[in-house]
Image (spheres, rainbow, N blue to C red):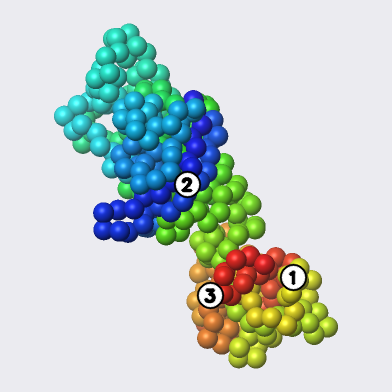
């Protein structure tokens, strides 16, 4: 296996659009790194530049100790798994797994050994004689993984490999990829727009927006200390609640909204130069709670109640501001009723309203 290092990587397309802007990070040997962001943020472009499928405008890609900018894709010792399975429809599973090895001139014994090992690891043995059209989406995706696996590459590149699967299959395949990574100890770079996939799979995550790296850290560090408002809002489902107002000290911190509504924040960590300034406060849905009798709080109107089994998503309206709370299952009043809510002040995030950077 090998590490992958990107140094000031930049991609400008022929029409002048900047696809990737000054991306620098290192994927350590044996690490599973996830690139995540909305559509068009540059994550697949980064992956394609690492693979050699996209020309680099400036900067450098290193795989191990080798600079590979001018190395052909076939010589980079990488294997790629795409969103489309890209299986040969006229070939059986066994033939699909073996085809790339035969093209590279491996002897029959090596081909058989690697194909059998991959089939056993991915549970493909009962279907080795099947054609792709006779298989489910999850099975075909396992064949695509197996085809990469038999290569025994230095680096695996996975470009949204689960996006064609239904929710149940996505979960099982996600577990399979995590298990596969643990077993192989392989270097993997995984691209997805799904923040749940990113949080559950990645040992570290690179968050991208409009071609620029926003933050790189472990999943929980990103969740608990987002560097800016974009990262805060992108990671987490449902998304973080965002409120802008003036932070005042009135026998304890209070966020005073533009319409005069006061949200008590006693116990919150006061940001530097905090009191007396306008800022943006972010609060995760699980930290917006029902106020107990006698607790300081504020009133919000019930808009929609979404029971999902082990929890309830409570959509609220604070005047014209939408809020969402994640609460345990319990009886609730009808839509339109008013509830008294409170913010878990110690879990509030503060951001500069202009730069959107964390305070």
The residue indicated by pointer 2 is 8
Q: Residue 317's spot in the image, x, y percent?
A: 55, 82
Q: In the image, which is nearer the foreground, mark 1 or mark 2?
A: 2
* Residue 327 makes an appearance in the image: no
Q: Earlier in the sequence, mark 3 or mark 1?
A: 1
Q: Residue 26's spot in the image, x, y percent?
A: 53, 39
State left or right for residue 89 relative to residue 74: left
The residue indicated by pointer 3 is 315
Q: Residue 284's spot in the image, x, y percent?
A: 61, 66
Asked which quadrant contains residue 278, the reply is bottom right
The local secondary structure at tag 2 comes to: strand
Q: CA distance from mark 1 to mark 2?
A: 32 Å
Asked which quadrant contains residue 38, the reply is bottom left
Question: Decide: marks 3, 1 in contact (CB < 8 A)?
Answer: no
Q: Residue 184's spot in the image, x, y percent?
A: 50, 26
Q: In the image, which is nearer the foreground, mark 3 or mark 1?
A: 1
């Amino acid at each position: 296996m090998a590490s992958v290092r990107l140094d000031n990587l930049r991609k400008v397309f022929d029409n002048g659009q900047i696809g990737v802007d000054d991306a620098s990070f290192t994927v350590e040997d044996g690490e599973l790194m996830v690139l995540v962001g909305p559509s068009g943020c540059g994550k697949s472009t980064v992956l394609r530049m690492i693979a050699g499928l996209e020309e680099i405008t400036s900067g450098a890609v290193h795989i191990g100790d080798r600079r590979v900018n001018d190395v052909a894709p076939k010589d980079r010792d990488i294997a790629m798994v795409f969103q489309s399975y890209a299986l040969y429809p006229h070939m059986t599973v066994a033939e699909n797994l073996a085809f790339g090895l035969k093209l590279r001139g491996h002897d029959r014994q090596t081909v058989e050994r690697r194909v059998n090992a991959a089939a056993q690891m991915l549970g493909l043995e009962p279907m080795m004689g099947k054609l792709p059209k006779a298989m489910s989406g999850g099975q075909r995706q396992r064949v695509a993984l197996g085809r990469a696996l038999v290569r025994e590459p230095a680096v695996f590149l996975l470009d949204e490999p689960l996006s064609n699967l239904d929710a149940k299959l996505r979960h099982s395949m996600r577990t399979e990829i995590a298990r596969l990574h643990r077993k192989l100890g392989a270097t993997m770079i995984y691209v997805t727009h799904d923040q749940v996939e990113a949080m559950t799979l990645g040992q570290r995550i690179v968050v991208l927006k409009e071609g620029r790296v926003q933050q790189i850290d472990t999943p929980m560090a990103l969740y608990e200390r987002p560097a800016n408002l974009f990262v805060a809002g992108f990671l987490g489902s449902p998304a973080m609640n965002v409120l802008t107002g003036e932070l005042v000290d009135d026998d304890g911190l209070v966020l005073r909204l533009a319409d005069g509504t006061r949200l008590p924040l006693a116990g919150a960590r006061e940001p530097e130069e905090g009191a007396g300034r306008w800022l943006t406060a972010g609060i995760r849905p699980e930290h917006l709670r029902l106020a107990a009798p006698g607790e300081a709080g504020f009133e919000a109107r019930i808009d929609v109640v979404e029971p999902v089994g082990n929890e309830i998503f409570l959509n609220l309206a604070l005047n014209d501001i939408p809020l969402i709370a994640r609460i345990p299952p319990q009886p609730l009043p009808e839509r339109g009723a008013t509830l008294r809510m409170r913010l878990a002040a110690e879990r509030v995030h503060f951001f500069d309203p202009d730069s959107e950077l964390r305070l």
